[in-house]
Amino acid sequence: MKTITLNIEGMHCGGCVKSVTRVLTELDGVQSADVQLEGKANVTFDENRVNVAQLIEVIEDAGFDVTE
């Protein structure tokens, strides 16, 4: 398992946090996602099943900007 921290812009409320948490945890291979309103997400995932680009893609598809 690998854990990374992603910087997320555009979250303004608890609903945003829930949305980002949901799209991340729905990905096969994501063990956990600790998303904070301040714009940080600590994601633990299996590198053999999902990659960082896929994590970023689902967050961007949910309407947020992401950087590593």
Image (spheres, rainbow, N blue to C red):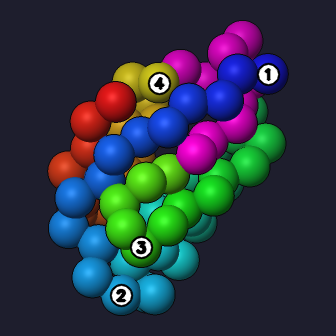
Question: Counting other residues with Cα less than 10 Å from the Cα at mark 3, is it few (<14), some (14-19), or many (20 or more)?
Answer: some
Q: Residue furthest front?
A: 38
Amino acid type, residue under disc 3 in the picture? Leu
Q: Quadrant of residue 1?
A: top right
Badge 1 is on which residue? 1
Badge 3 is on which residue? 37
Q: Say if mark 3 contacts mark 2, CB within 8 Å.
A: yes
**12 over 45 or under it: above or below:** below
Amino acid type, residue under disc 2 in the picture? Cys
Instruction: Specify start and end residues of the magenta stretch as a single range.
Output: 42-51
**Where does the image place residue 61, in percent across and percent down from the top left?**
28, 53
Foreground pick, 11 / 28: 11
Residue 18 is inside the magenta segment? no
Q: CA distance from mark 3 to mark 2?
A: 7 Å
- The earlier-in-sequence mark between 3 and 4 is 3
- The residue depicted at 46 percent of the width and 87 percent of the height is 14
